[in-house]
Amino acid sequence: MSKSSGDVRIENPLMPAGGWGSLGEVTTILFDQRVPLKDSRLLLKQNKPDGYACVSCAWAKPANPHPFEFCESGAKATAWETTSKSIGADFFQQHTVTELEAWDDHRLEDQGRLTVPLRYDAHTDKYREIAWDTAFAEIGAALRSYEPKKVVFYSSGRASLETSYMYGLFARMYGNNNLPDSSNMCHESTSVGLQKTIGVPVGTVVLDDFEKTDCIFFFGQNVGVNSPRMLHQLQAARKRGVPIITFNPLRERGLVSFTNPQSPLEMLTGHETAISTQYHQVKPGGDTAAVMGLCKAILALDDAARNGGAQRVLDTAFLLEHTQGFEEFEAAVRACEWSDIERESGLWRTDLESAAAVYCKASAVMAIYGMGLTQHRNGVQNVTMMVNLLLLRGNIGKPGAGVCPVRGHSNVQGQRTVGITEKPELAPLDKLKEQFGFEPPREPGMNTVEACEGILANKVQAFIGLGGNFVRAVPERGLMEAAWRELPLTVQIATKLNRNHVIHGKASYILPCLGRIEIDRQAGGPQDVSVEDSTACMHGSRGMAEPAAATLLSEPAIVAGIAKATLAPNPRVDWDRWVADYSTVREAIAETYPEIFHDFNQRMWTRGGFRKPVAAANRVWKTESSKAVFTVPEELKGNPDLSGAPATLRLFTVRSDGQFNTTIYSHDDRFRGVYGSRMVLFMSRADMAKHALAQGDVVALRTAASDGVERRVAGLTIVPYDVPPGCIAGYFPELNGLIPLWHHAKESKVPAAKAIDVILERDRRPS
Ligand SMILES: Nc1nc2c(c(=O)[nH]1)N[C@H]1C(S)=C(S)[C@@H](COP(=O)(O)OP(=O)(O)OC[C@H]3O[C@@H](n4cnc5c(=O)[nH]c(N)nc54)[C@H](O)[C@@H]3O)O[C@H]1N2
Ligand SMILES: Nc1nc2c(c(=O)[nH]1)N[C@H]1C(S)=C(S)[C@@H](COP(=O)(O)OP(=O)(O)OC[C@H]3O[C@@H](n4cnc5c(=O)[nH]c(N)nc54)[C@H](O)[C@@H]3O)O[C@H]1N2
Ligand SMILES: [Mo]
């Protein structure tokens, strides 16, 4: 694994996803991170009924797991947390913060685990160790002096249900709903789109459905890298002959073929399973148009069936009994021209017709999707359009069918379930009032984009981060980093050093915490926590590795420490008791949300998890009309209004197999055959010819927006790749400086990281 971000090496990415390459990567990272042997054996406990929930993605954990219910990405995340590398006070004595600012993301985190609480000292420009009690007292005093509406409580989606519940309660007792989280940059388009069409904010599919489905539509999700355990379900489905129809601008290895590294036979014979049976390289942002085409083709097949006296293609009984708005939708589809569909989707009518034919032959279809749908100006519309497609043949609420958003962080869905939300209507405020005897704030809080706007406008006094790397993950890097330094207070609860610690507020604290894989010893003995997976199933998780340092506190203990130092005592909220015994937090959660969490402590170790009620999965529609709702798309355009200056290319940002979000494990991307640098642009040969570029040429990108802000990233090496002409791909977070803050999904405010119009400029030839 190469470490430098200097020279780029480009190879043909011939290997299938999984396979020997995957095993090699696991061994390398365990070795690089000097993971003790006993901890590497812990991988066998990952996602097991009595083990710990993987800290990588949120994919479902089966009731009967494979002996090795982990994947390359999960092993990397485990190695990254259980590393024996660590940094204490002496590290920060040796390096000024200005010096650390010049380090790249990989180097910062690769120092290892943070071990002591730190406070920034402006005189020496260094972080210095501070006692936990002093840190809490100082942070509490500062928070008491601020206006509660001007403080932001961010969470990245990893913290447990217990921590998240305590954190949300703390924010509300303090006096705001300013609880943005990583899902504001991620699946918020799902939460908004599904809620308004099928009455639930989450997917309807469970693992069992993979065994019953006849057909899978797969939109904009890179399963081989970002949720590889799902490859098991996909491979099994493919072996049953289930077609998988993929829509993705980029030909992703994991969506093309897969070798199961846990099958000795496949490894020895080099057997690969072809995953996608059709692969449609849709234009970024073109999914609404593509699905419009599918629906148009389905209506045509239905017309033909009706005219020929054959069985209807549409599920008319379902449409009548369960849906609303079909007529308007049908009229809109019929009125839509194929030429518009082809232009906006970048796909041929005949291709869409052949995908529609497969859809119509299947009796149970599921739609799986990720950031390719949600991170667009029309991200919510992409989601509701996909729902339209499913509704046509009653593909929601029956076995083998349904909606399957693939969530990112391992508990991002769960955090929402237990009250991390800036939307007061989504939190049980009356219940909290009754349970804890305080007056919860009723005004809407700030989501991620609004928190950024507040910070840019100097309207935020403090930012508390429960995990994550906010300033690196958000758009508008240039303006955000500058404004960030003006924040009066930043507090980061974290496991690893990252950019958000070296770009910091005037007063700044880093509070190091235990990770979920570690044993969490409290007054009441070792504690377990719980998380919710992508299919709405709750799981217990037991820490098993020795903590990285004896000086670490758990996340619940840190949240309680700050809360106690900030709030007036409330006899009904016993923070100490909660920290001593997390089962008492679960009792409180069960009291707040009895329908979901009754008997939480007894049920948390249920094999395969216990599921929260998802009404739509039973064809109960919690919408205004009590029906599933068809929605007419406002427009087909993928990128309606990022303009002003004429663009030359449309950029979409993606993840590599060497990263977890802003955590950069290495500068290599094995699946795409790029080694040694992440400063690359994937470009079609047609565009290379058009712009007279050769492989290895170095270019710069400027955002095509005429709002007076200069957004430019230089030093990007051209890599020829199979992407549609007119479109280029590059890496998140390196290219975040190109995304204007206002370039976000219309209703959900998810930054539109998958379609940014840019202008290509010559940078320099490699010397
Ligand atoms: N190893 C690893 N695992 C992870 C993460 C990680 O960084 N590393 N991150 C976690 C998190 S927080 C999340 S949210 C998920 C993210 O997982 P994904 O949803 O897979 O996210 P991305 O890699 O950003 O890109 C998704 C895919 O969308 C395609 N795409 C881009 N634009 C479009 C479009 O307009 N239409 C369509 N149809 N496709 C498009 C891209 O080519 C890419 O294959 O993964 C989680 N798991
Ligand atoms: N351009 C572009 N931007 C994007 C995206 C994109 O696709 N393109 N994707 C968006 C998405 S989907 C997401 S989810 C966001 C991600 O945004 P974030 O969730 O804010 O970022 P991460 O990189 O996941 O956070 C990594 C840090 O979390 C800390 N950490 C790790 N484990 C723990 C733990 O157990 N406890 C605590 N307290 N801290 C821990 C470590 O210090 C580590 O440095 O980025 C978004 N930004
Ligand atoms: Mo995410």
Image (cartoon, rainbow, N blue to C red):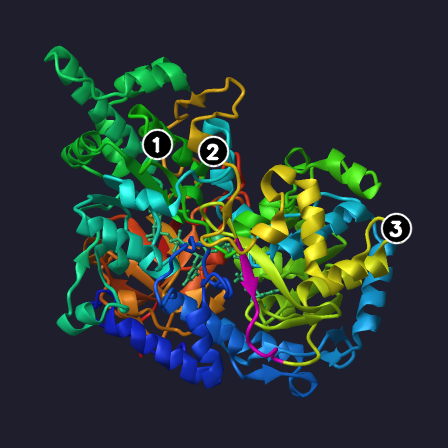
Q: Which residue is mark 1?
A: 398
In this view, the mark in front (2 or 3)? 3
Residue 223 in view of the camera: yes
In the image, 398 versus 141, the foreground residue is 398
Q: CA distance from mark 3 to mark 1?
A: 48 Å
Main SS, magenta region, reads loop
Tell me the quarter of the picture where residue 616 sits. Answer: top left
Label of residue 47 in the image: none
| Of the image marks 2 and 3, the number of the one nearer the N terminus | 2
Is 630 above or below relative to 50? above
Residue for point 58% across, 62% down:
469
Label of residue 571 in the image: 3
| Of the image marks 2 and 1, the number of the one nearer the N terminus | 2
Q: CA distance from mark 2 to mark 1?
A: 20 Å
Pointer 1 local density, CA inside 10 Å: few below 14, some 14–19, many at least 20: many
In the image, 315 versus 329, the foreground residue is 315
Tell me the quarter of the picture where residue 731 sits. Answer: bottom left
Residue 462 painted magenta: no
Residue 708 in view of the camera: no
Q: Magenta segment range?
A: 539-548
Query: Which amino acid type corresponds to the residue marked 3 in the rendered image?
Result: Pro
Query: Which amino acid type corresponds to the residue marked 1 in the rendered image?
Result: Lys
Q: Which residue is mark 2?
A: 193
Residue for point 60% across, 71% down:
495
User: In the picture, which quadrant includes the C terminus?
Assistant: bottom left
SS for dot 3: loop
SS for dot 2: helix
Pointer 3 local density, CA inside 10 Å: few below 14, some 14–19, many at least 20: few
